[in-house]
C-alpha cells in the first residue's frame, strides 16, 4: 500500500473517510463480535453464513430476544426454546413457522449523519441507509441464501449484494459458492473500521468464489478462491483480480478466540498484486465485557516498499442489560510516507430495548498527525430487523 501524496490528497482521504462513516452506499451490517461475551464464538451459532452477518436462523432469533434485548426476555431461566420464533423475534412477528425450510428477514436502517471537516461545509443529512429482504432456504444438507434491496446510490434499483448456495458435505466439511464477503480477521459491524474498509472488506467488497469450510469443536478453517471482487467483475472497472483467502480460528475457550488470516489479490489492470496477513484476538473476561484486538500487515509487489500497517481495538461494556458502551482506537500507517498516517477514535452507545430494535450512536474523530487536520462525525441509526 503506497503512501498518500500531497496535502490536497491527504485532506481528500479524511473527507472521504468522513463521508463513508455515515454509510453513504452502505450495506447491511454484520454480526457484532461484542457478543463473544455471551459465549458464542462462532457466527453459525446464530447466522446462516459462516462469515457472519445477514439473516438469523430461528435459533439465532430466539437468542436475540433472551440474551440481548432489555425488555424482551421471557424465559425465567434465560434460555429460550430452541428455534422459537412465535413472538416478536420472528419474521413479521411469527408470520413464518420456525419449522419452515424458508426463512425471511427484513432489514431497515434509517440514519442521521453530521460531518464536521474544518474548512469544508457539509450539511446534515437524514437518509434511509438500506431496505433489504433476506431469505434462506434450507433442505437436508443444502442451503440457498440471498438478499435483495434498494441500491444505496443511483436510481434506487434493486440489487443483490450476497447470494450463494452451500452444501454440508459431512458434519465437519462444507462447501459454498456464489457471492459473499471473504472470511478475514474479525468482522466488525462498522464497515468503515480500518480492519474492514482499509482492507477492501467493506460494504460492497464481496467476491465471487468458492469457499471450503472445515469446522471442529475448537477450530474453524475457511479457504476461498475466485475471480475477484463481484462489483468489479460486473462493472468491468479494471479492478478485478484473482483472489484467494484463508482464515483459521481457534476457540481457546467459549469467551476467548484467536484468529489468523491471509488475503491475496493478483495483478489487475489498476493495481499490482497484493497480500495481507492479520492476527486477531477476542477475549470476554466477563458476561458484560468484550475486547477485540486486530493487527494487520499489507504489502504490494512494488520496487519500493509499500507495506501498510493497521492496529485496532474495540472494547464493549454492557452497563445495563441491552445497553452497551463502546470505544475503538484505530491506527493505520505506511512505511514510505509519514503523511499517510491516520488515527481514529470511536465512541459508541448501542441500545437494544426490544428484540431486533437497535439504536446506534457513534462519534468518530479522525486525525492526520502530519498535518494536524482531521474530521469529526456523528452517526445516529435506528436498526430494525423484522
Image: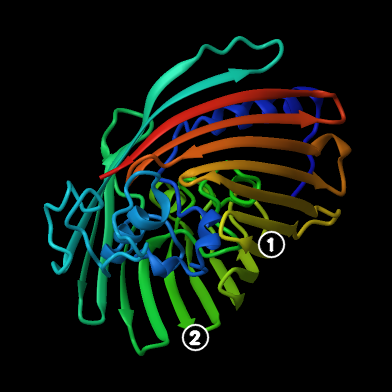
Dot 1, how many residues are within 10 Å of its Cα: few (below 14), some (14-19), or many (20+)? many
Disc number lying in front (2 or 1): 2
Horizontal relation, residue 9 to residue 263: left or right: right
Can residue 63 be spotted in the picture?
A: yes
Q: Is residue 227 above or below residue 360?
A: below
Q: Earlier in the sequence, mark 2 or mark 1?
A: 2
Q: Is residue 219 above or below residue 318?
A: below
**Whole-percent x, y for residue 377 in the image:** 61, 25
**Whole-percent x, y for residue 361 in the image:** 52, 31
Name the residue located 69 percent from the left edge and 62 percent from the top edge. 276
Residue 114 is marked as: none
**Whole-percent x, y for residue 221 in the image:** 54, 78
Instruction: Measure the alpha-carbon separation of dots 2 and 1.
Output: 26 Å
What secondary structure is found at the residue carrying circle 2? loop
Horizontal relation, residue 196 to residue 366: left or right: left
Q: Is residue 359 above or below residue 309?
A: above
Dot 2, how many residues are within 10 Å of its Cα: few (below 14), some (14-19), or many (20+)? few
Residue 216 is marked as: 2
Residue assigned mark 1: 276
Specify the quadrant of the image occupied by residue 273.
bottom right
Name the residue located 30 percent from the left edge and 66 percent from the top edge. 59
Image color mode: rainbow
Name the residue located 65 percent from the left edge and 12 percent from the top edge. 120
- Front residue of 158/222: it is 222
- Front residue of 171/192: it is 171
What secondary structure is found at the residue carrying circle 1? strand
**Whole-percent x, y for residue 242 in the image:** 53, 65
Looking at the rendering, in which quadrant would you find the C terminus?
Answer: top left
Can residue 251 be spotted in the picture?
A: no
Q: Single out the residue that lies furthest toward the front.
A: 76
Amino acid at each position: 500500500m503506497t503512501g498518500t501524496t500531497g496535502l490536497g490528497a491527504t485532506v481528500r482521504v479524511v473527507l472521504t473517510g468522513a463521508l463513508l462513516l455515515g454509510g453513504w452506499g452502505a450495506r447491511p451490517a454484520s454480526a457484532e463480535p461484542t457478543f463473544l461475551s455471551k459465549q458464542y464464538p462462532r457466527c453459525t451459532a446464530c447466522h446462516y453464513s459462516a462469515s457472519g452477518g445477514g439473516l438469523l436462523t430461528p435459533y439465532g432469533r430466539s437468542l436475540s430476544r433472551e440474551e440481548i434485548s432489555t425488555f424482551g426476555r421471557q424465559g425465567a431461566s434465560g434460555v429460550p426454546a430452541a428455534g422459537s420464533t412465535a413472538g416478536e423475534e420472528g419474521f413479521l412477528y411469527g408470520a413464518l413457522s420456525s419449522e419452515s425450510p424458508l426463512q425471511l428477514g427484513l432489514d431497515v436502517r434509517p440514519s442521521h449523519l453530521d460531518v464536521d471537516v474544518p474548512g469544508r461545509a457539509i450539511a446534515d443529512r437524514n437518509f434511509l441507509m438500506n431496505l433489504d429482504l433476506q431469505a434462506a432456504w434450507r433442505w437436508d444438507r443444502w442451503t440457498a441464501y440471498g438478499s435483495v434491496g434498494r441500491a444505496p446510490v443511483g436510481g434506487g434499483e434493486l440489487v443483490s449484494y450476497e447470494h450463494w448456495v452451500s452444501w454440508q458435505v459431512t458434519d465437519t466439511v462444507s462447501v459454498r459458492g456464489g457471492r459473499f464477503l471473504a472470511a478475514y480477521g474479525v468482522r466488525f459491524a462498522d464497515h468503515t473500521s480500518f480492519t474492514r474498509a482499509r482492507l477492501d472488506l467493506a460494504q460492497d467488497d464481496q467476491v465471487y468464489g468458492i469457499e471450503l469450510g472445515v469446522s471442529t469443536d475448537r477450530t474453524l478453517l475457511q479457504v476461498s478462491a475466485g475471480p475477484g471482487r463481484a462489483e468489479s467483475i460486473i462493472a468491468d472497472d479494471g479492478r478485478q483480480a484473482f483472489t484467494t483467502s484463508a482464515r483459521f480460528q481457534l476457540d481457546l475457550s467459549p469467551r476467548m478466540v484467536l484468529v489468523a488470516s491471509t488475503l491475496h489479490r493478483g495483478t489487475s489492470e489498476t493495481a499490482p498484486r497484493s497480500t495481507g496477513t492479520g492476527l486477531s484476538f477476542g477475549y470476554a473476561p466477563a458476561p458484560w465485557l468484550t475486547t477485540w484486538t486486530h493487527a494487520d500487515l499489507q504489502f504490494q509487489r512494488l520496487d519500493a516498499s509499500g507495506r501498510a500497517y493497521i492496529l485496532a481495538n474495540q472494547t464493549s461494556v454492557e452497563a445495563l442489560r441491552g445497553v452497551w458502551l463502546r470505544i475503538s482506537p484505530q491506527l493505520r500507517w505506511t512505511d514510505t510516507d509519514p503523511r499517510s498516517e491516520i488515527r481514529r477514535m470511536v465512541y459508541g452507545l448501542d441500545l437494544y430495548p426490544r428484540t431486533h430494535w437497535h439504536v446506534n450512536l457513534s462519534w468518530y474523530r479522525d486525525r492526520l498527525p502530519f498535518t494536524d487536520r482531521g474530521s469529526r462525525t456523528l452517526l445516529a441509526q435506528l436498526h430494525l430487523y423484522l
